[in-house]
Image (cartoon, rainbow, N blue to C red):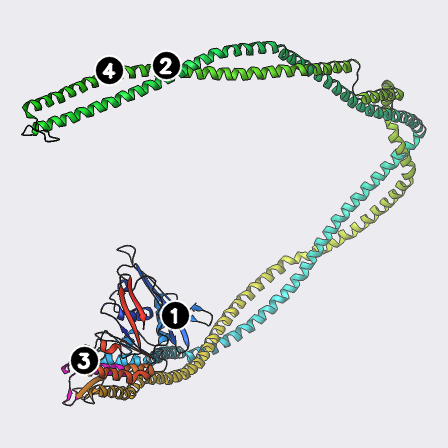
Amino acid sequence: MPYRGDMPSFSFEGIQTACICGDNGNGKSAIVDAMTWALWGESRAKSPDDVIHIWESEASVEFDFRIEDQLYRVKRKRARPKKATGAGQSSLDLMIYDGEGFKTISGNTIPETERIIKDNLNMDYDTFINSAYLRQGHADQFTRQQPAKRKAVLSNILGLDIYDKLEEKAREKMRGQQTERTMLESAIRDIDAELVSKPELENEFEQAKTNLSQIDKEVKEKQAEFDAVRQKRQALENKRQQMKQLEEHIAYSNKQLALRQSEIGQHEKHIKEYEDLLAQRQEIEKGYAEYANIKSLCDDFNNKLQQLNSLKDKRWVLEQTIEKARSGLVNNRSVLKKTVEDLENKAQKLAQYKEELAKIEEAKPRLEEKEKKFEAKKENRQALQYSIKQLKSEQESLQKEIGEIDEKLNLLCKEGENKCPLCETSLGVEGLKIIREKFENDSNNNTALIKQKETEMYNLITEAETIEKEIAADEAELKSHQKWLQNRVGNLEQAIEDAKEAGNKLIKQKELLADTEKKLESLDYAIEEQKELKALDEKIASLKYNADEHLHSSKRLTELQEFDGKKRGLEEAERLLSTEKEDLAKAAAASEELQKQLDIDEKKKKAIEKELEALPQLESESEQAENILKTVSARQRDAQETSGNLKGKLEHLQNQEKKKKEKEAQLTTISKEAGIYSELAQAFGKKGIQMMLIETALPDIENEANELLGRMTDNRMHVKFDPQKLTKKGDVQETLEITISDDLGARPYETYSGGESFRIDFAIRIALSKLLAKRAGAPLPTLIIDEGFGTLDNIGIEKIKEAINSIRNDFEKIIVITHIDELKDAFPSRINVTKTPDGSVIELN
């Protein structure tokens, strides 16, 4: 498209009939291309990238349109591929205006969004270009189509594709019903195959019930026999359980009897021990009295020892505190002695530092003299450098003069006559010779001077290099000496200050040292702790604790320790002797009663053992009866399983019979519905309702076309549409033939002239456009004519104007694209398209 950059928006609002004017190639038709490309992604361009301007990398169109009262906006964008082998990038957005702004209703993909646009427009691109849009060079697009294609276009214009969808849905339903009918018929056949075995199963089921009844009777008999033997066996099993309990009771009684015998022995032992202690009463009481006295004495010694240890702990803490204070003073004295010694050493060096500083001050004039000599050498170096520069400049001037003299000599040699090359004065042979000799002498003199100056310059350079070396050596020596002097003076001045400060501090430190030594000599430290220590020593002395007596008392207490236990034993014997004798009598009586019960239990045990001798025989009989019952019961279960299986199969067949009836009823219903859907598919098909609607619409199209064609040809030409024709076999074939007739009668479309064929095409296309504009649900009651009217003469053009004016009220908008001046002024609105270096421009006049 010829449009570039950010084009200003253009609105067709308020325009009912207009023409788009401009020179060929300016981009008139591209305006419609932009609309169709935005809506359907199709235009006159052969490839997607052809819509992009040759100097641009992408194209974008934003198109607002209305469907009834609803405003939509579509925005399509295309970017060239970044690489030659790559693919371009496309995007498509569809938006709807909700009163506040546009919100997107796009699909997930571009094809899905295009389908939404097509569904809303109820029209595709082919329908548009065959009806509402007369493209340049394609006015005969509908007329020259094959009959089937013309009928398809007409079907799309009438919106008959909905019947195609209904036909497809009816056929889908019909196919579904046919599939279900096939499945039902197959299921019924399968059920019939199963029901064949029903009589045989019923006979087998009766036999199985008879066999099961006989086995049930046998099971009852064998169960009764087994129950009788089991009861006898259970009685003896109970006896055996009694026997077990009795044996456990006898064992328990024997244990209890042994416990009672042990208790009797313990009681007798305790009685003897108590009686022996009571016999030693006098000796025990005497020994315990001495033990009590010694224990009291030891307790007193222990109390004093505890107090003594506590006082000693406190004394140790005080001694540590006092020693710490003394050690602090001793350490402080050592530090002060060292400080005094250091300060004395520093103070003694004050005179030495001052003397050295004075010597340095005396040496400063010598250093200044060296600095003056150094500056003189630098000035001498600068003078030499200037002289060298002057000599070099003079040498260059002499060299330049030699060049000029050589040029003059060359000029003299070139001249054929004896004339001055500068002023053209005649010189003569002698004059010329004199001038040449003078030039040569001047050149030789200058050469000699150059050599002389080279010698002078060499000598000066040599001298300058020598001075340069001396300056470098002197500068290094001066800097080193200056740095040393600066550092040394600074150090000496600081040392003098330090020595003075040390002298001032020395007096104070000596006073502190004397005070510290005095405190150490007079014990003037930790005064309170020393007082507390003296008081503790007095308390320790007042305890009068004797360690030897304490040790002797402890040994004697150990020797008398046994009387403490004997005293408690004596008291216990006095308290418990009578109780032990009573417990002994009770234990003897209980032992006698247990022995009597043991004798009774032993007699019961022998009687039960006699009865249990018959148990092995009963166990054998019970096991045999149980095995017989298990065998018969197994036969009973097999018979029950057989009967149950047969019963289940018969019930299954009964259910299958019910299902068969249900499926037969379903089959009848589905067959009817399949017939209905088949009839609907035919009705919705091309030869049904669609054909009827086309046949109904054709007279209107024909009338509209003939009315317009009559205006343009003074009723000389007519069009007729035939939806059917007879084949060679005499059958009726669906078609859409166009028959054109004039004063000479009906003849082929191709035999008409360019102007005549254009009028025919124009009339038919306008009729189709009016049909599209009137169609229910059609959103674009617009006619666009992009056709050169060059095949028409002036009368034909006037007829076209009249035709367009006659149909202007049938469309909301009529847009004509032309460059013919006779048509430009026929429209109330004109849209001019002008081409500029920056792209085409659209303006409304």
Q: Position of residue 513 (x, y in %)?
A: 72, 14
Pointers 1 and 4 in contact (CB under 8 A)? no
Q: Front-most of 469 and 171? A: 469
- The residue shown at (43%, 83%) is 661
Give the quadrant of residue 663.
bottom left
Give the quadrant of residue 104.
bottom left
The type of residue carrying mark 4 is Thr
Give the quadrant of residue 561.
top right
Number of callouts in the render? 4
Q: Position of residue 530 (x, y in %)?
A: 82, 20
Residue marked by disc 4:
455
Q: Is residue 656 above or below residue 834?
A: below
Horizontal arrangement in the rendering, residue 499 relative to residue 807 (left or right)? right
Q: Nearer the viewer, mark 4 or mark 3?
A: 4
Element class at badge 2: helix
Q: Earlier in the sequence, mark 3 or mark 1?
A: 1
The type of residue carrying mark 1 is Arg
Q: Earlier in the sequence, mark 3 or mark 2?
A: 2
Q: Position of residue 99 (x, y in %)?
A: 46, 72
The answer for how far apart the CA atoms under marks 4 and 3 are is 107 Å
> Which range is magenta?
742-767
Residue marked by disc 3:
792
Element class at badge 1: strand
Pointers 1 and 2 in contact (CB under 8 A)? no
Q: Earlier in the sequence, mark 1 or mark 2?
A: 1
Q: Is residue 407 above or below residue 552?
A: below
Q: Earlier in the sequence, mark 4 or mark 3?
A: 4
The answer for how far apart the CA atoms under marks 2 and 4 are is 23 Å
Element class at badge 4: helix
